[in-house]
Image (cartoon, grey):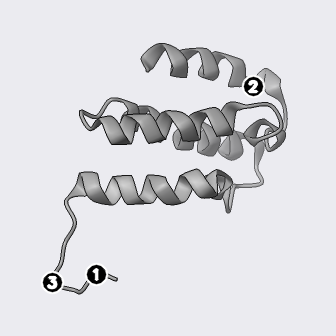
Amino acid sequence: MLKAAEVLPSTDLTYKILILLNLVPLTLFEGTPTDTVEYDNFFEDVLASLVACLETDDERIRYLTSIIARKLMSDGSVFLLRRSLDSGAHNFRAKFWRSS
């Protein structure tokens, strides 16, 4: 466990968070709003944060983010959480992979 005086650089902290998310990726969607519009915005914001991780210079972060994204975008995973696939999830999936 880290002591208060030990501070991790942001890339190390990001990597450690990604390690946790790799084990339980659906925790990204805990506490989702019940309103349809807010739900869609929340969903898009969470996945957009993964795109930002793919743009980092740290290869460890890019690699682990791609693994998490595959888990979230695979059949039977996060898309079960979606109320409908008509609301742009397919478009987001295509944009996401083009950015990586």
What residue is drawn where x is 24% and y is 33%? 57
Q: Which quadrant of the figure contains the N terminus?
A: bottom left
Q: Callout 1: few (<14), some (14-19), or many (20+) C-alpha neighbours within 10 Å? A: few
**Residue 10 tag number:** none
* Residue drawn at the location 35% of the way across and 54% of the way down: 14
Q: Is residue 19 left or right of residue 68?
A: left
Residue 46 picture quarter: top right
Cα separation between marks 1 and 3? 8 Å
Amino acid of disc 2: Ser
Residue wearing tag 2: 87
Q: Which mark is residue 2?
A: 1
Q: Amino acid at mark 1?
A: Leu
Quarter occupied by the C terminus: top left
Q: For mark 3, what is the residue?
A: 5
Real-space Cα separation, disc 2 to disc 3, in angstroms? 46 Å
What amino acid type should be assigned to the residue bearing mark 3?
Ala
